[in-house]
Image (cartoon, rainbow, N blue to C red):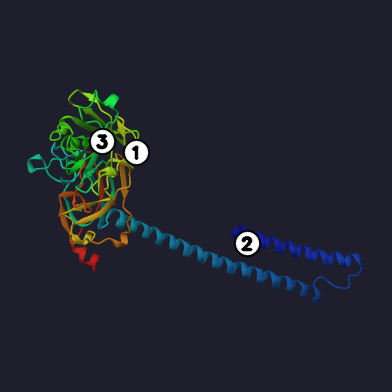
Amino acid sequence: MDNIKKYVLGSVLVILVLFGYYKYKSNLDENKLTTKIDSPENLSDFKSVLNNLIKLLESEKKSKKIMSKQLKELATLNKIQTRHIKDITKKELFNKNIEKHRLFIDTHNINDTNLDRSNYVYHLNGSHETGAKNQTGGYDQFKNVIGFRLVKAIIPNTNHTVLNTRNTIIVQLDDDDSVSATVLNSGDINKKFRITLPEGFFDTTTITESFTNATYEAIDTNTTGSTNLINLYEITPDFIDESRKFRFTMKNNANGVATKFKFIWSDIGNNSAQTFLGFNGDTEVFSNPIIADIPPDMSVNYIDLIIDEIPYIACKKNGKGNRLIDRIGITSGLGELFEYTQDWNFENENYFYPMKLDKLTIKLYETNHDHFFKSDRDHSLEFEITIIKNAKDFDFLIG
């Protein structure tokens, strides 16, 4: 500001000097000193210049006052903002009443050889003496919990469910007399028999148990050993990881020789295991082994995550009245991990009355099949817990 003032005053002085010099020079050039320097005419010109100078100085002074006022206001505003930021930092970051914590639950942290991964209790506080079978050193009892939600779930897609609506297989034995006569029992060439799988839960490694415990029944009454076929022609499945398909082999247990065969799905009604095992239709030629056409259809569309400890107001309402935290849709391929992330809007969060939380009873349920989800592979769940430090303020929060 001082530099501007100096610049203005210097400019005015230069103008006055030039003006006087101009007037004086003009009189000398004309060799007429008819008008004195202090004449009324010259004084009038000087007054005009001085008036302009005064106006300029007043304008500069006014601008200086305005700018000085603005600087003071800005300094005051900075002080207010600084104090406000300090208050927010102290209150919202260090002294806030609402806190949110992320909590990981993973089944590989549970030391239990008989663990049911679809129905188990996970302890947040406790020891082996108090019944806790998982490590709890990284957790503690949460007090004044008022909110709970699922953030993310990582679940393997390994489940096969055998139901009585899809558990029937029809097998036809090789019809080549020249080959089969030395492999099949006499009279069994080109004959058919039915395999009925028991109901249960199987994955890609335990599916063999379903065939081991299956019922083999002769369709053609003259098939050798029709009452005990499983001891003669036993089919064994295995899962090919690269193609994600089942492979089936059959051998004659009487002589230990591999036997060619076909799957005939067109002879079965609605309870065919065709899609369950991954076939589009009847096998075209007799062979051994037989590889399925497509990856098997496990028919598990979604899993309901149920936690009994969470109040119903924070759960999703459902027909069964379960404490449903969320419904997890299964979209990954068989044998693959599926990662589910919840789409969350904090404005829709329902708080509940402050409670203590020292354990979670985790249930993974297939509501569409009305049974628990079965898997021998571990899964991981991430939750967000909302707690309030001062429970006395809770009435204000929910008011």
Q: Which residue is mark 2?
A: 5
- The quarter of the image holding the C terminus is bottom left
Confirm whether residue 50 shows in the render: yes
Q: Residue at x 66, y 59 (%)?
A: 7
Near mark 1 (Cα within 10 A), the count class, few <14, some 14-19 or many ≥20, is some
In whole angstroms, how far apart are the C-alphas of marks 3 and 1? 18 Å
- What type is the residue that disc 3 sits on? Gln
Q: CA distance from mark 1 to mark 2?
A: 93 Å
Comparing 369 with 108, the one in front is: 369
Quarter the N terminus occupies: bottom right
Residue ranking furthest to the left: 129
In which quadrant of the rendered view does residue 123 lie?
Answer: top left
Secondary structure state at the residue bearing disc 3: strand
SS state under label 1: loop
In the image, residue 219 lies at what x, y percent? 19, 39
Q: Which image quadrant for residue 322?
A: bottom left
Q: Residue at x 28, y 31 (%)?
A: 175
Mark 2 crowdedness (10 Å alpha carbons): few <14, some 14-19, many ≥20: some
Q: Is residue 14 left or right of residue 151?
A: right
The quadrant holding residue 265 is: top left
What element does badge 2 sit on? helix
Foreground pick, 182 / 14? 182
Q: Do labels 1 and 2 touch, CB within 8 Å? A: no
Residue type indicated by callout 2: Lys
Percent of width and height locating residue 280: 34, 43
Which disc, if any, is residue 293? 1
Q: Which residue: 17% across, 49% down?
A: 360
* Position in image of residue 229 (x %, y %): 16, 33
The amino acid type, in three-letter code, at marker 1 is Asp
Mark number for residue 172?
3
